[in-house]
Image (spheres, rainbow, N blue to C red):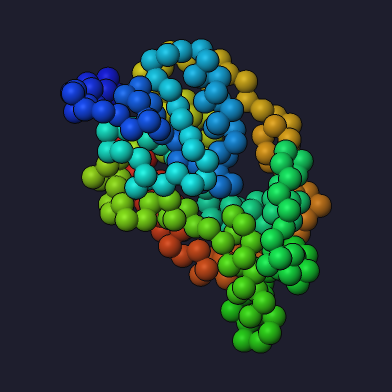
Amino acid sequence: MFKKTRKKIRKALKGKSVPEKFTANDVAFLHIGKNAGTQIIQLSTQLNALQNDFRIVSSGHGLKLKDVPEYVPYFFSVRHPLSRFRSGFYSRKRKGQPRLYNEWKKEEEQAFANFEHANDLAEALFRNDGIGENAFWAMNSIGHVRTRQTDWFQLSGNFLKERPPVWIVRQEAFENDFDVLLQRLNSNLSVADLAIAQDEKSAHKYAYTQDPSLSDLAKQNLEQWYRADLEFYTICSNWLERQ
């Protein structure tokens, strides 16, 4: 499949200039925040050093599908929205530490002053009082929390049908899905040949053992808030099953 796609790309590019950002050998990674993107970039760096059949490129969180030329193959990762919310909340509460350090914006500072834990914020959603109003603005102010996975596919129509990705990597099935991605890229390598970061700093992950779990009310509110992302997650999962 990938070789046929490459032939089509080279045929389409014959006699044409290629934008500086991409070459005919590139595979674009759409880096959706809090979806195991740091781990994917680390593995991609290793892959790019070990072979030259393709090159995985990423331009950070700002690269959306509409920014990727149609001749460039791409892939992305997804995560269940409730898990992504919790990860995004605590990532910003820690200001990105230990791997990074990004100071709060004033709106984030106020949000964390009002809500100590992710569960507190989620439970306060849709309340008809000042606490509910604070929750609404916090959800629209905290980095990663305020973004939706569908944001990366605006103005792209039914892209899974019209412009399907090479593969989709689910955070919950990371190693298996990344192996399938490599197979579809015709790589002789697998995840077992690469070094997956295990420590919190390198993997940019965090254990929530000291933080409260999401209550039933919190989950119910988040399912309402992220309704479109839940549908998107289901659609992506169904697409994977059909392949």
Residue at image position (26%, 28%) is 17
Where does residue 112 sit, x and y in percent of width and height? 75, 65
Relative side of 39 to 198, left or right = left
Residue at image position (18%, 23%) is 15
Relative side of 90 to 51, left or right = right
- Residue 106 to residue 36: above or below: below
Where does residue 138 sit, x and y in percent of width and height? 65, 69
Task: Note whether residue 115 is visible.
Answer: no
Q: Quadrant of the N terminus?
A: top left
Relative side of 234 to 41, left or right = left
- Residue 46 to residue 176: above or below: above
Q: In which quarter of the image is the C terminus?
A: top left
Residue at image position (34%, 47%) is 66
Residue 228, by quadrant, is: bottom left
- Residue 227 to residue 204: above or below: below
Where does residue 171 sit, x and y in percent of width and height? 54, 41
Where does residue 136 sit, x and y in percent of width and height? 60, 74
Task: Note whether residue 198 is visible.
Answer: yes
Q: How many labels does the image show?
A: 0
Residue furthest to the bottom: 129
* 214 vs 195, nearest the viewer: 195
Residue 76, by quadrant, is: top left
